[in-house]
Image (spheres, helix red, strand yellow):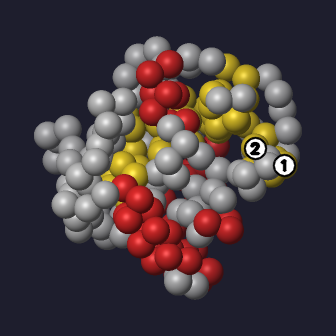
Amino acid sequence: MVGKEFLRKVYSEKRKMLSEKKIRQYSYRIASLFTARFLSPGVKKIHVYLPIKKNAEVDTLFVIQKCFQRKVQVFVPKIVGRDMVSVEIFEHSKTIENSWGIPEPENTDFYKNTDFDIIVVPLLYCDYNGNRVGYGKGFYDRFFSSLFGSGLKVGLNFFSPEERVEDMCPTDVPLDYLITPTEVLSFSGDK
């Protein structure tokens, strides 16, 4: 068992060691697994993060493109004060970076408490119980508690779980699934 701060540091460094080519290859594999497993005809609304390039995050633009092709409504996060809200984007939506370097839509029409079928979650690490280690600001945990319904929480990561996270808080919301370049892990009992 290992603490969140240690895991943040280790996996942040591991990601930064990946080449742009590897990030692109792995992101494409992850998007392919996501599409095959989760983009069924019943999926109407998805909330998905836009990747922070400087943090070498999984590139979700492949997932977003597949959603547009299948006529799925796509919402992305926008930070407003201490909260994260959802803004719908379209194929030609423009983005700008906020003060943390996170791409956000220029559009300011946001939807709070939208009922999503799937929420694609950024992370640095996830263990075999679905416990997610993010950047430590709590935006996604607060966001989950504000939602109507219970959309699937799907994390994307370049690395498979190795260590159990020891210092989870009662407010930390676990994932339902994790997708890596080689597998889809379920934490809800589904296979």
Disc 2: CA contacts within 10 A as few (<14), some (14-19) or many (>=20): many
Q: Report the residue at 62% width, 80% height from top.
A: 20
Point out the image quarter for the N terminus: bottom left
- Depth check: give the residue in front, 176 or 4: 4
Disc 2: which residue: 104
Q: Are marks 1 and 2 in contact (CB under 8 Å)?
A: yes
- Depth check: give the residue in front, 65 or 152: 152
Visible residue check, residue 16 = yes
Q: Report the residue at 36% width, 69% height from top.
A: 159
Look at the picture and state if 120 lies above or below 117: below
**Which element carries disc 1, helix, strand or loop?**
strand
Relative image position of residue 164 (x, y in whole percent): 21, 58
Relative image position of residue 92 (x, y in whole percent): 82, 45
Disc 1: which residue: 96
Visible residue check, residue 65 = no
Q: Amino acid at mark 1?
A: Ile
Relative image position of residue 157 (x, y in whole percent): 42, 62
Disc 1: CA contacts within 10 A as few (<14), some (14-19) or many (>=20): few
- Does 180 sit left or right of 121 as displayed? left
- Does 86 sit left or right of 126 as displayed? right
Which image quarter: residue 76? Answer: top right
- Does 86 sit left or right of 5 as displayed? right
**Which element carries disc 2, helix, strand or loop?**
strand
